[in-house]
Image: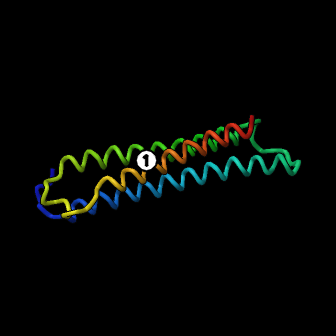
Amino acid sequence: MSNLNDPRVFFAAERTLLAWQRTGLVLMAFGFMIERADLMMKALGQSSVWPQNLGLWLGLVFIALGIASIVIAVHQFRRILTSLQPTELPPGYRTGLSLILNLGVALAGLLLAVSVFLMRF
């Protein structure tokens, strides 16, 4: 892909992966916050400004978007890794750890979505 023979190319791709991971985490946290705020309003006896269960579904959509952004970022990073020359990879650097970490975060987000859904029904 780049033929620059410079390890900074790899580190730039890894920073991009981590930026997408942060984006996914924020989307999941925002979805959880939306769902909990709707639940808290119901617990306080306040009428929700949203139709019934919209807070739940909106929160789940944001959690799903967070999961999707992380999974897509992992896919893109794997494609970048296969296109790099061996000289562009730092010697002895384990490139798979960041992929495993991101997939673990995506799996945790999936478990969060399932638990949020099951708590409501």
With 113 as the anchor, is 77 left or right in this view?
A: left
The coloring applied to the image is: rainbow
Q: Quadrant of residue 6?
A: bottom left
The quadrant in which the C terminus is found is top right
Q: Is residue 26 above or below residue 42?
A: below
Residue 71: x and y, percent? 42, 44
Q: Identify which residue, 83 or 51, lies in the foreground.
A: 83
Q: Quadrant of residue 86?
A: bottom left
Q: Going 80% across and 44% down the picture, which residue do you hit?
A: 48
Tell me the element at label 1.
Answer: helix
Residue 72: x and y, percent? 39, 43
Residue 85: x and y, percent? 13, 54
Q: Going 54% across and 48% down the picture, which residue do you hit?
A: 108
Q: Which residue is mark 1?
A: 103
Q: Going 47% across and 55% down the picture, which residue do you hit?
A: 23
Q: Residue furthest right?
A: 45
With 8 as the anchor, is 5 left or right in this view?
A: left
For label 1, the crowd category at 10 Å Cα-Cα, with few meaning under 14, some 14 to 19 and many 20 or more, is some
Residue 90: x and y, percent? 20, 64
Q: Is residue 40 above or below residue 119?
A: below
Disc 1 marks a residue whose amino acid type is Leu
